[in-house]
Image (cartoon, coloured by chain):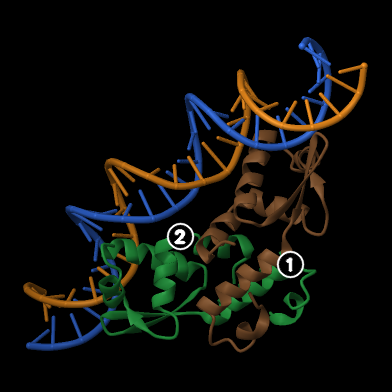
Chain colours: A brown, B green, C orange, D blue
DNA sequence: GTGTCATATTGATATTCATCAATACGTTAC
DNA sequence: GTAACGTATTGATGAATATCAATATGACAC
């Protein structure tokens, strides 16, 4: 569970958002992520996955030598709900959208 | 209107989130913001206000010599809705929470 | 016009962070 | 055990950015 600042920092990078998009609704191992992220090295991908992991924004599963990642959509929704309660309390739909 | 990356970058700073909290549901002029942000200089506050302004996250109103700012809650909600559609499409409430 | 006040901008500095090459670690096969 | 493979970590470098002091800009009063 991250607060609004950690969540924003985790999302504040184009490479990480591209990785998040890749991991939305499917599991990919690190090697496949590296393949899809053209011109980004494996250590860099691993670095960004670590940041997403520490922010709780990805699920991780080990299978033999490979490590699979998937986007934690629930955590994304929870963090967005928190931002809306903090910074959009007067927008009607915001207050009832996501429970935590 | 900002995309998910610009929004996240604008929110990815503790000082800016503190300023946003100050401006939530009320108008403050720059001087009052500086007073409330202890140990942060006026140029630094102005710098952060410029970033929030360029991200569309604040309303601005001039009154004589003073410039008043207020949080744009609607834009916050719109950006959160965009993030949820992009990165939490399978969370039930996310898809119907905010229209754009 | 001048002076004063409030805010914005400039220039410099320090910190944070993204990136890569090289290396270490963990797992499986043998 | 060793070798090979996949991933994580380390160390170094460059870029982005937060911060401040000093200055500039804009608005009002006179």
Where residue A77 appears, as percent x and y from the top left, is: 68, 70
* Rendered view: C3 above or below A27: below
> Residue under circle 2?
B13
> Camera-side residue: A32 or A72?
A72
Where residue C9 appears, as percent x and y from the top left, is: 34, 60
Residue A75 lies in quadrant: bottom right
- Tell me the CA gap for discs 1 and 2: 23 Å
Q: Is residue B65 left or right of residue B54?
A: left
Count of numbered labels shown in the rendering: 2
Residue B82 lies in quadrant: bottom right
Where residue A69 appears, as percent x and y from the top left, is: 76, 49
Residue A17: give its label.
none
> Residue under circle 1?
B88
Q: Secondary structure at mark 2?
A: loop
Q: Secondary structure at mark 1?
A: loop
Residue shown at 62% from the left, 41% from the top: A47
Where residue B18 appears, as percent x and y from the top left, is: 40, 69
Residue shown at 39% from the left, 63% from the top: B15
Residue shown at 53% from the left, 64% from the top: A3
Residue A67 lies in quadrant: top right
Q: Residues within 10 Å of mark 1 (few under 14, many from 20)?
A: many
Dividing the image into 4 quarters, which one contains the C terminus of chain B? Answer: bottom right
Disc nearer the start of the sequence (1/2): 2
Dot 2: chain letter: B
Tag 1 and tag 2 share a subunit: yes
Q: Is residue B65 left or right of residue B100?
A: left
Residue shown at 78% from the left, 76% from the top: B92
Dot 1: chain letter: B
Q: Is residue B38 left or right of residue A64?
A: left
């Amino acid at each position: 569970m991250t607060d609004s600042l950690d969540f924003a920092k985790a999302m504040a990078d184009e490479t990480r958002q591209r990785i998040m998009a890749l991991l939305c609704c499917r599991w990919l191992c690190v090697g496949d992520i590296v393949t899809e992220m053209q011109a980004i090295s494996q250590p860099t991908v691993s670095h960004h996955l670590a940041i997403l992991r520490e922010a709780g924004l990805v699920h991780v599963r080990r299978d033999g030598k490979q490590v699979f990642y998937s986007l934690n959509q629930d955590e994304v929704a929870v963090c967005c709900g928190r931002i809306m309660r903090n910074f959009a309390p007067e927008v009607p739909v915001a207050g009832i959208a996501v429970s935590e």
